[in-house]
Amino acid sequence: MATKVYIVYYSMYGHVEKLAEEIRKGAASIEGVEAKLWQVPETLPEEALGKMGAPPKSESPIITPNELTEADGFVFGFPTRFGMMAAQFKAFLDATGGLWRTQALAGKPAGIFYSTGSQGGGQETTALTAITQLVHHGMVFVPIGYTFGAGMFEMEKVKGGSPYGAGTFAGDGSRQPTELELEQAFHQGKVIATITKKLKGSPA
């Protein structure tokens, strides 16, 4: 049986989605791991999204709360809104009350990745405040720490991400994830997949 890692994300302008794609590739590079991309449902009407200049959604399937139980591990991604996860992702998690009641996700590892508008816009607080969601479900938070090596100490170029997880800066929306940020996302996928595989293979 393959180890299943679900990369579940919300992306309005595509920045988080680009990171998600690299995380999937990183997770899938680990032998015996099956990695799949999922989007959470959009809560804004098409008219509002059009006025905000949001592009059409990708073809990644929309996940339902109960489908989370199929996975062995997760990486959750979202843009920040005032230093916390976007409301669309929070709305999805708010719908997982049934899973919380039965603790169906307890013991499953989960990582976090994100996008912010600026360097002081929530690269750490977005992840930090999201951890409460994992705690109530009994999930095991898996940070990347400083396992990305020298890339964690890049000082000459603007780079998103932190020990909490991969990240990028959207700026006014025109900035796209850099090569280094994408490499960090790939690395996070490998880290989560490796730990998820180990936990699944451990005797109870």
Image: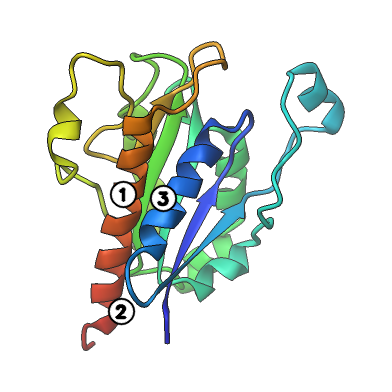
Q: Nearest the camera: 106 or 154?
A: 154
- Alpha-carbon neighbours of circle 3 within 10 Å: few (<14), some, or many (≥20)? many
Residue type (three-letter) at the residue carrying disc 3: Ile
Q: Dot 1 lies on which element? A: helix
Q: Which residue is mark 1?
A: 188
Q: Earlier in the sequence, mark 3 or mark 2?
A: 3
Residue type (three-letter) at the residue carrying disc 1: Gln
On screen, residue 16 versus residue 109, left or right, reads: right
Q: Which mark is residue 200?
A: 2
On screen, residue 68 versus residue 27, left or right, reads: right
For image coordinates 18% across by 23% down, the residue present is 154
Q: Are marks 1 and 3 in contact (CB under 8 Å)?
A: yes
Q: Which mark is residue 168?
A: none
On screen, residue 122 versus residue 99, left or right, reads: left
Q: Dot 2 lies on which element? A: helix
What's the distance in space between the residues labelled 1 and 3, CA to CA? 6 Å
Query: Which of the 4 image quadrants contains residue 146?
Result: top left
Rendered position, 122 above or below 91: above
Query: Which of the 4 image quadrants contains residue 45?
Result: top right
Q: Which residue is mark 3?
A: 23
Q: Earlier in the sequence, mark 1 or mark 3?
A: 3
Residue 193 x/y as whole percent: 33, 64
- Alpha-carbon neighbours of circle 2 within 10 Å: few (<14), some, or many (≥20)? some
Residue 158 x/y as whole percent: 30, 16
Q: Quadrant of the N terminus?
A: bottom left
